[in-house]
Image (tube, coloured by chain):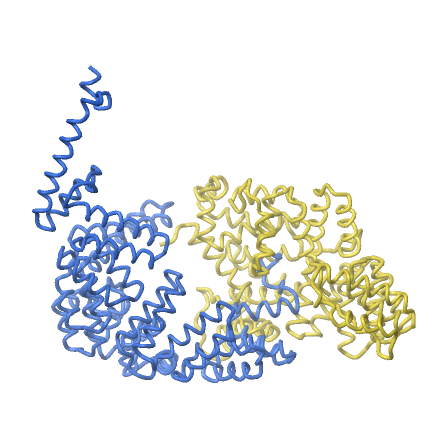
Amino acid sequence: MGQAVSIYGLSRRGRAPLFIGIAILIVGVGLFAVSLAPTLRGAACGVLGRVGIDRVTPGCAAAARARLAIAAGQAAVVRNSHRAALAHFRAAVAAAPDSADAQLARGETAEILGEYGEARAAYGRARALSGSFEATLGEGELAARIGDVETAVRLLATATPPRRRSATFAFFGGAATMISCAADQWPDPSALWRECVPATRRAGHRFFIASRNAAAQIAFRSLVEDGQRERALAYARDHGWLALSSDWCGGESAFDFETTGALAVLAHPDRAGCAAEHGIRAADLGRVRMARFLLQHALATPLDPSIRARVEHTLRYGLPEHDVPKLAESLYRTASRLDWVYRQPTEEIGVCHKVIAADPRLSWPYHVIGRDHMLRGDHRGALPWLEKALEVGPRDLKALYNYAVTLEWLDRREEAIAAYQKVLAVEPDNAKVHASLGMAFDRLGRHDQARQQMELALQLDPRQREARDYFNHQFGRDARGGPTAFTAR
Amino acid sequence: MRSHLTARVTAALAIALAFVSVGTGTAGPQEPRPTTAESPGALLERAWAAYAQGRHQEALETARRAALATPRSLSALLALGGMAEFMGEFDEAYQAYAQAQALAPNDNVTRYRVASFATRIGDYDRALRELDAILGTQPKSMQFFFRWAPPFLQKPLLKRSPALEQFVALQIDILMEKGDVAEARRLGRRHAIVDSGRDYCAEANAKKTGGGSADEVFKAFRLAVLGQPSAADCIWWYGQWLTDEGYMRLGRLMVEEGTRMTSSQENKNSGNRFVRIRLGGPRPVAKRAESLFLIAKQRYLRDGDGEGAARLFDESLRLSPTFARPYSYKARLALDDGDREGAVRWLRRGVEADPDSWRTWHNLGKVLLAAERWDEAEQALAKTVDLFPDDVGGRLALARALYAQGKWDGYRKQTEYAVGFARGCCGADVVKEPAGFFDKFQRWGPGAALPPTSDPRVILGWNQD
């Protein structure tokens, strides 16, 4: 009976025919797999992979190696080691050039690391192999990043996510809204119905629209940034966006802030001022072209004087004076993401060098490299980079501020003070710079001037930390802010 | 999108707390928008603007005018009360709050502000009653939740609402100042401010050595006090910190608690000495006097308002004549006026009021030293180091007085001790100049110049004044 139910119970002689049979089966399936088209072969190997015999099946071994390499790459991504992940994905592509998954993974990782050429080739191959939404979106978005507007528009026109995916996206978006709302309204069941249900419905709808139009927004922004204003407007009209809202200047928008701002400018040119905040935000994020488009149009309309001043300041000091090539702008954003999102300063610096190659007149990458030296305590190494940043971008106030800080570290305090004062000449309301100048005066023993700057800093921003710490150190904690030591803090 | 709790308590508290922290304007619904420069609304706005920019005296005066112009305006009365409280004008604050409460007895903002003021003047029971009254205005379900929900539900509630967190924090602080540390700890656990079994003391020490901001470190030690009743060192450290800042009452309570909890007899002796020579020993300070002192100090140092500060120091001394610290500031004010003899008189009065006040002796010795009254300075500084042998600044000052009188052995002994101690605790640079002078003295003997002195901040708890 034992022999009938378990192969482990078979005698040595009885096992041999079984192994031979399995080998013949694997070879047969393998030959069949080899004869299939790449897509079908991928599926067949996938099935064999599920039962763990793809590695020993002819025709599927390469796919198995690719599968393992992809898994290793994904693990490296989880560990935030994108360079190692890219090596794994390259190995996966070498093992199975027809694997759309491997190509897509390679494309995404190469893009994160600023290897745009490799990323574009990989996305293109993935799209040719699978025609998937992700591959098309990746290739189209990358084309937009390097300034190939026509390719971007052509590809992104075909990149619509499956409806089910958008529905799922909408469901989770709505659910998050419901949870957040319910956490506030739970003591009042009627408010759950009155407030939360409509909010959830609206949020779900917004998320659905955003998902359906994710690719189209990229194409639209490309057209706007490329100066093709009429075509962009027609594009928005064709996609039915102008019908989505009668007022892009107010209310809830399903789209990101840049698309919303651009739609406001194009749909209501006489009220383009409402896009001013979007433009300032875009400038903060290094989106030079979009920021310039939004801010210049905003400036052409009546604006509140304080907003007008901010717009003018941003145009003059927050953006480079020259037209930055799209490639340089995109690489700079990639470098920023490597710093802020992935915390990979070494990779960030590598991409900054590419930015310099793409546009040597842009001060930002020099500043970033200088700042990196500063963060590592290498102030002597930082100085030439900051000097270069100021040489190509004399209006780069962030570089000027860090230049002053570096001079202070190098004990060139008088020069540091002069640099801080230059920043303040442009931004007299910058509390942080007043505080830094105050500290510089204090270190030089010019205590009255130090105190004066610190007082100014606190008047401008009562929470300014350096100034508060300065006074707390000098005079003890100000106990007047609260009735107890803890509440006064 | 706000619950009953956040809509009522939190919003009200947020407004009240915004006042005490940054002073943003809070024109109430009954207050129409200003139309003319001298309208009450405009005055109130000007008062808030001056307050936010640190022109506190001007802010108070403007708030007075606003309240005078509209005596039935709640926002004007609360502004006046808050600013008067901030400036230590407690009688005026009391009047304004009383009028506000008569005008709107059920207003939670007013209640919170009254609770806050009552805490400042030591009327803790009143403060707790007002806080209870605020909670009493909430729906029963919310009260039940707030009082009895398990900590894992309380934690997210408090995290979502900083105002509510501060509400609980104030309750805890009041209980601690009342001396009911056990109840404060119970409240802390109930609202998940602290969890049992967590080593808060180690976390606080890690923050201290890891370069956390002063406020972060302070808060971490407070959590250690609440969450770890057996962490004697941390409790003691918190007490010394509070002492430096001028919170004599809570500082004493914490140092005494730390001393009680420590198992080392040496530490117990040290704690008892700290209470005796830094916290007034058997001469406790009235809460109102303490609050006036704290405010006066800031009016003097930050605002440069010597006159207003002097008045508050005098009031503080009237309430607690044996409270030594205001005497030192009265002496500083006299020195600012160029009246060195007046300063000496104030400091002598200080050591008469509290003969064990180490810091007052220290300051007296330094003033006498500056006046080159070597013999008197020697006596005062000898008393100083006798009370607190690790006083580096006191020893260096004593060494100078001895040097000036040609007492070389005494100079050598005091300087060696001070330099050795300072190097051991805080590094070679702390007493660089006196040490350099001492090296030359050892090599070549005495010279014409007097040894330099410095008064480095070496140990928390012994620094201010």
* Count of numbered tags: 0
Q: In this view, does B133 lie to the left or right of A320?
A: right
The yellow chain is: B
The hue used for chain A is blue
Most foreground residue, B88 or A287: A287
**Where B371 falls versus A166 (above or below)?**
below
Most foreground residue, B12 or B325: B325
Q: In this view, does A365 lie to the left or right of B308?
A: left
Indicate the position of residue A133 as horizontal and vertical percent values.
17, 57
Q: Residue furthest top?
A: A1
Most foreground residue, B305 or A38: A38
The quadrant the C terminus of chain B occupies is: bottom right
**Where B291 falls versus A302 (above or below)?**
above
Indicate the position of residue B309 as horizontal and vertical percent values.
70, 70
Indicate the quadrant where residue A368 lies. Answer: bottom left
Name the residue located 62 percent from the left edge and 50 percent from the top edge: B174
The quadrant the N terminus of chain B occupies is: bottom left
Q: Is residue A214 visible?
A: no
Indicate the position of residue B10 as horizontal and vertical percent values.
46, 54
**Where A139 falls versus A359 (above or below)?**
above
Q: Is residue A72 left or right of residue B383?
A: left
Name the residue located 77 percent from the left edge and 46 percent from the top edge: B266
Name the residue located 56 percent from the left edge and 71 percent from the top edge: B51
Q: Can residue B86 be seen in this view?
A: yes
Most foreground residue, B333 or A365: A365
Q: Residue furthest front?
A: A13
Name the residue located 42 percent from the left edge and 81 percent from the top edge: A388
Indicate the position of residue A457 as horizontal and vertical percent values.
54, 75
